[in-house]
Amino acid sequence: MDWIQALILGIVQGLTEYLPVSSSGHLTIGSALFGVDGEANLTFNIAVHVATVLSTCCILWKDIVWIFKDLFQFKWNEGTRYALNIIISMIPIGIVGILLKDKVEAIFNPATSEAHFGNPLFIVGCCLMLTALLLTFSHYAKPRQREQLSPWHAFVMGIAQACAVLPGLSRSGSTIATGLLLGNKKERLAQFSFLMVIPPILGEALLDIKDLLSGDVATTDATTAIGTFPLLIGFLAAFVVGCMACKWMINIVKRGKLIWFAIYCAVVSLLVIILPYII
């Protein structure tokens, strides 16, 4: 991977982690276009995902500080309730990570996905269409505008996040659309959606680092081939673009303009599914 490819993939990750168009799906498409093996560049994937977590912390630092200040008061208050909802939302993705991690990773790995799951880009295309449908349903759903997110709604949004481990099914799109369909107030949904993903991404990054250090993943040669400079470029691109996309997405959700992303996902889905049979 050269620095230009790292720059492009970093920008793609930074944008699509927050916009409801699936970062994993776009990284899979980008890796296929560049001929980059996703498993072989596990180090790069860890770097850009950590970069987007840091961008979330940078944009939403006031919310994070508020949660921790309320938590350290050691009494039941708004921050404690918010933190509890985040913990509840992590339960489904934790179950998926423990029980289905290997099967999910097989979908991302071209060496195994072709044999067991079919063309990985076809899977991405189908999941992008599901994202488009979910965003469309949430756009036309009758709003009820609940003032507070309940623990049950947090759990259902967590289920949506767990389903979004499939490449092409947008995590932010799935969680925000699910929250809207449940009737929650849109002004707070984007913040909760972005905050609830921080622990799972960091947990996944720590597990991947453990695999790299233990030698469970054969990525030594490929990781060396990436180089420090492209890795740094990808990290910085994902962080800077992620900061802009995070702030932009919060405003988009408040204005209720998700339907345009549904159209985009549908178009990309059809292109990904149809083009391989034409070219």
Image (tube, grey):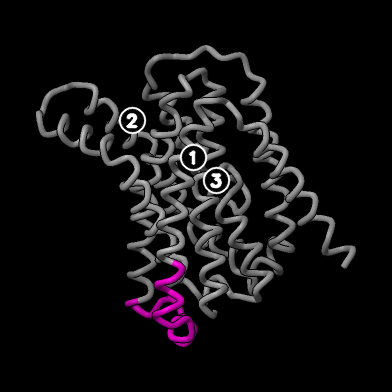
Instruction: Spot the residue most to the left.
Output: 73
What amino acid type is highlighted by mark number 3?
Ala
**Residues marked 3 and 1 touching at CB (< 8 Å):** no
Q: Where is residue 68? Give x, y as percent.
A: 18, 36
For marks 2 and 1, give the one nearer the viewer: 1
Judge from the rendering whether residue 90 lies leftward or rightward of residue 33; answer left or right. Answer: left
Residue 2 among magenta residues = no
Of residues 136 and 212, the one nearer the viewer is 136
- The answer to whether 70 is drawn above or below residue 46 in the figure is above
User: Would you say the residues marked 2 and 1 are in contact, meaning their CB atoms lie under 8 Å apart?
Assistant: no
Decide: is 163 above or below 4.
Answer: above
- Residue in view at x 11 percent, y 34 percent: 72
In depth, the one of 252 and 179 nearer the eye is 252
Q: Kindly identify the amino acid type of the residue bearing the numbered disc 2.
A: Asn
Is disc 3 placed on a helix, strand or loop? loop
Residue named by callout 3:
164
Q: Which residue is mark 2?
A: 85
Closer to the N terminus: mark 3 or mark 2?
A: 2
Which residue is labeled 1 in the image? Answer: 248
255 in relation to 109, above or below: above
- Estimate the spatial distance between the alpha carbons at disc 3 and disc 2, rounded to whole Å: 19 Å
Q: Are marks 3 and 2 in contact (CB under 8 Å)?
A: no
